[in-house]
Image (cartoon, rainbow, N blue to C red):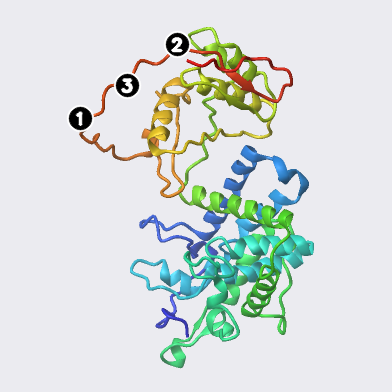
């Protein structure tokens, strides 16, 4: 029996409407059907933003797989053990709901006549939306599913009927009437006929075991670069949908960097800034300090946005936190805020410790640390602004190299 296994009298859950996906809000915990619809809708927001950019254009089924996974990812929360866990003061179930969700992926894949590729990819996304399949060679992270579910697992005990302290306290994890109701709801959402279940067909525990074994075998070996990248991107899309949907937050759709960025500058743009604005594709710009590289980069990015699918975002990378904070403040002041906002919504984070820097995403503002007087001599005045060298993709650009001081 798994740690935290349920025991005690079985509470009566009369219908699917009583099945919860979350322990919050306390006054009316979120229902499984509500959560599934919410995450499915959140995928649509992400698809609108990204569409078929880059490698996604090579896989027409990408977004349909993510949508199916969003609908099915938490189906395993129907288990009685999970339902008791999310009750006020509930105890941990000890099993992974996403593994039980694989049984519903298997059932709906058969009902919808999915291809093998669709079945495997949807199952991969569902299984890995919390934990990896295999332990990472570098260590760390959450325990892998392969460590908990293997040849030693008592599958029927975990997902079928869990023994209690006495025979009368045995718990059927998924009562048949709830299973049929959930299966009908999922089938209706996917517009397919519900799969027929009869005596002798594989149980939910067996379906979960068999499909997990398939995934563990497939992803035990190095993936082809194309296949692996698509899987990681799909996994990221589902995870983002789950996080944003669970928080009941919509993605920011406003782009503070508008077309015609240079026209908003309070001065006549320099030639290299105009050149950058008109450059399509990659651009490398080398120029002295104070020559307007930031404006040139923003002008270039504004030009790229017009040709990209979806609602693309701009990522500005810098090597130090101090420079990140400085550019965040500058962009928040200079770019166009969303309607109703006073400043542009700019978020900054680091790879080590992602954290929002925008006032919209912050709850408190720490006072600035006191400055220690510097003993260094004052810096000399900056030299007069010099011409920039534009290393853009246009041949024969002709902008001069910086002259020596």
| 3D distance between C-alphas at marks 1 and 2 | 28 Å
Could you say whether the residue bearing mark 3 is in a helix, strand or loop? loop
**How packed is label 1: few (under 14 Cα within 10 Å), some, or many (20 or more)?**
few
Labelled disc at residue 384: 2
Q: Quadrant of residue 261?
A: top right
Q: Position of residue 1 (x, y in %)?
A: 47, 85
Q: Position of residue 131 (x, y in %)?
A: 53, 65
Could you say whether the residue bearing mark 1 is in a helix, strand or loop? loop
Labelled disc at residue 373: 1
Dot 3 and dot 1 residues touching (CB under 8 Å): no
Instruction: Please name the residue shown 26% across and 24% down the image.
Output: 377
- Which is more N-terminal, label 1 or label 3? 1
Dot 2 and dot 3 residues touching (CB under 8 Å): no
Q: Is residue 278 above or below residue 364?
A: above
Q: Is residue 185 visible?
A: no
- Which is more N-terminal, label 3 or label 2? 3
- Which is more N-terminal, label 2 or label 1? 1
Residue pointed to by mark 3? 379
Closer-to-camera residue (152/48)? 152
* Farthest-out residue, top: 268
Instruction: Please name the residue shown 39% across and 67% down the image.
Output: 87
């Amino acid at each position: 029996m798994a740690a935290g296994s349920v025991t005690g009298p079985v509470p009566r859950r009369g219908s699917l409407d009583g099945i919860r996906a979350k322990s919050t809000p306390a006054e009316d915990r979120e229902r499984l059907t509500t959560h599934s619809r919410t995450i499915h809708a959140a995928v649509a927001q992400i698809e609108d933003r990204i569409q078929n950019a880059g490698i996604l254009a090579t896989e027409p089924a990408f977004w349909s797989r993510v949508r199916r996974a969003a609908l099915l990812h938490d189906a395993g929360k129907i288990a009685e053990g999970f339902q008791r866990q999310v009750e006020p003061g509930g105890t941990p179930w000890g099993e992974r709901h996403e593994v039980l969700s694989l049984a519903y992926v298997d059932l709906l894949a058969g009902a919808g006549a999915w291809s093998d590729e669709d079945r495997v990819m949807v199952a991969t996304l569902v299984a890995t939306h919390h934990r990896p399949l295999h332990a990472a060679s570098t260590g760390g992270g959450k325990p892998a599913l392969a460590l908990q579910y293997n040849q030693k697992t008592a599958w029927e005990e975990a997902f079928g009927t869990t023994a209690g302290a006495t025979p009368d306290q045995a718990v059927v994890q998924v009562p048949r009437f709830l299973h049929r109701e959930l299966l009908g709801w999922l089938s209706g959402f996917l517009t397919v006929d519900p799969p027929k279940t009869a005596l002798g067909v594989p149980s939910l525990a067996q379906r979960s075991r068999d499909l997990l074994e398939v995934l563990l075998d497939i992803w035990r070996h190095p993936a082809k670069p194309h296949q692996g990248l698509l899987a990681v991107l799909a996994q990221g899309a589902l995870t983002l949908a789950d996080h944003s949907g669970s928080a009941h937050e919509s993605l920011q759709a406003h782009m503070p960097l508008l077309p015609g960025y240079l026209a908003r500058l309070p001065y006549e743009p320099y030639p290299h800034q105009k050149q950058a604005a008109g450059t399509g594709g990659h651009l490398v710009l080398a120029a002295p300090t104070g020559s307007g590289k930031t404006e040139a980069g923003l002008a270039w990015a504004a030009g790229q946005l017009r040709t990209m699918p979806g609602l693309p975002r701009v990522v500005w990378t810098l090597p130090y936190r101090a420079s990140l904070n400085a550019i965040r403040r500058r962009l928040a002041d200079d770019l166009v805020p969303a309607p109703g906002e006073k400043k542009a919504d700019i978020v900054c984070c680091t790879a080590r410790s992602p954290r929002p820097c925008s006032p919209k995403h912050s709850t408190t503002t720490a006072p600035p640390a006191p400055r220690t007087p510097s003993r260094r001599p004052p810096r000399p005045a900056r030299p007069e602004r010099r011409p920039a060298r534009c290393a853009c993709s246009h041949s024969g650009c002709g902008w001069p190299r910086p002259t020596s001081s």
